[in-house]
Amino acid sequence: MSDQNEVDVVVVGAGFSGLYLLHLLRKNGFSTRVFERGDDVGGTWYWNRYPGARCDVESMQYSYSFDEDLQQEWHWPEKYSSQPEILAYIQHVAERFDLRKDITFGASVTAARFDETANRWTIETDSGESVSAQFFIMATGCISTANMPDIPGVDGFTGNIYHTGNWPHEKVDFTGQKVGVVGTGSSAIQAIPVIAAEADHLTVFQRTPHWTVPARNVPMTDEYEAGWKDSYAEKRANMRGSMSGSLRAVAPIDVSALDVTEGEREEAYRERWAAGGMTLLRSYNDLLTSDAANETAASWVRRRIAATVEDPDTAELLAPKTYPLGTKRLCLDTDYYETYNRDNVDLVDIASAPIDRITATGLETGGRDFTFDSIVFATGFDAMTGTLVRVDIQGRGALTLKDKWHAGPRTYLGLMTEAFPNLFTITGPGSPSVKSNMLTSIEQHAEFVTDTLTHLREHNIATIEPEQQAEDGWTDHVQEVANMTLFPKANSWYMGANIPGKPRLFMPYIGGVGAYREKCDAVAAAGYEGFRLECEENAAAAE
């Protein structure tokens, strides 16, 4: 084999995870190839170019911490960065550290098979290329496989169809158009105000209303930027030990919402609503564990919706009532509710009358026929596992990852799964991932994996994989922690509920970013407790 076709590590994905992994692996002397299906770096920020696309973590925190010069030199123009700003940052990092030379773009990994004799993975791409690697790392992101609903007639629509998760790279101009948006999740909440300002008329089709709070995005000030850059080391350390991997603008109140007066709650919720961001959910310590406490915040938000949306019937439709506040992904918005006061915006409830079919000129629902120039599907992703199981990954005994996870993902620490030696999943199911600041979790995972590979090399260890008991224990623990909260009460994509037939279980770990990091550090310090390590000679003898 050529040097390019036989390497130490193959990484799939060139987003934030893949780039940092490549940087670390190269720095530690591992020959590495990265495969990326897009034409450039960026990952989710390469594909999600829909109008209004923006991060819901503050710019000063949604960035790499591994290079102090990079931290100090990069300037974010806004408190919450837009997609073009984030993509420009990722491209800058790729250029700064000369990462593109080890990345093959426009290449999708279609299959990977573990050779139990050679203790190596054979990875295949859609171009027919085959690469051998000792280690195989899926850095494909948690929301990278768009979910297109199965609605009859889609192929016959004569207008334009878009999905927010796979947006065209050229600007889409909705001026003068009649546009339909299907879905009211995070991407729709960001896109709807922007599309409404441009389109002749916008009709939004909502199955389930979503909780959203104002972002209060503003241009970056010199004072705010300096406040972070002057103490980045301390702030990053606090982020790594925090619950969510982020620091909140308003401090949480460490008491029950039920142990204060109604007036005190009113003041706390009003302060956090005015501050913007995710601080509302941290107002009190039991908003995500007590139905009664949660309802105090939920009813407060419903009153804000009613006070903002002028039409009472529309306001009623927009106010969630079937699941607790924050148990689906809490969204940040800019003028989302205000948009429904525009004369050119209508809201249609498809919970009571689901979409029947897409027609040549629009769609039909509940006996009503709508005509559109463009339809935008903001219907989310097959999150956490979708991209992983779409690749034909075969471990020991030709067991596929899809079959191993037929009843739901089973991992140890969200990093590895038994029977798949030397396969790592960055921010995989069973890790904090989507319930954290992704950059904080990505850096921790990439560093843990690189340290692990270095340890294996130094001790002449051929393979690493979880012990079955450790995997079972961690999988149970992830569910136990989730069941101590209100999260399982929502039919969310955290539970796989947005994909028909997908097993229902809570996929991210919500025990806290800091607690999770401590667990990983303890596992490594104990000689990779819970993992089975086999040296070259032992692995050969087992054949």
Image (spheres, helix red, strand yellow):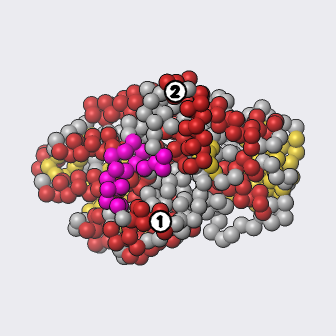
- The image position of residue 62, as x and y in percent, is 45, 58
- The image position of residue 531, as x and y in percent, is 23, 41
Label 2's element? loop
- The image position of residue 328, as x and y in percent, is 56, 38
Measured in 3D between alpha carbons, the distance from the residue under mark 2 to the one under mark 1, in whole angstroms, is: 35 Å
Q: How many marks?
A: 2
Which range of residues does the magenta coloring cover?
A: 231-250
Label 2 is placed on what type of residue?
Answer: Val
Task: Indicate the quadrant where residue 185 lies.
Answer: top right
Task: Indicate the quadrant where residue 24 lies.
Answer: bottom left
User: Which residue shows up at 77% across the image and 43% down it?
Assistant: 309
Task: Indicate the quadrant where residue 459 lies.
Answer: bottom left
- One can see residue 248 in this view: yes
- Residue 223 bears which disc, if any? 1
Q: Quadrant of the N terminus?
A: bottom left
Label 1 is placed on what type of residue?
Answer: Glu
Q: Quadrant of the C terminus?
A: top left
Report the residue marked by disc 2.
Answer: 260
User: Which residue shows up at 36% across the image and 39% down it?
Assistant: 411
Does the segment drawn in magenta span residue 26? no
Does the segment drawn in magenta span residue 242? yes
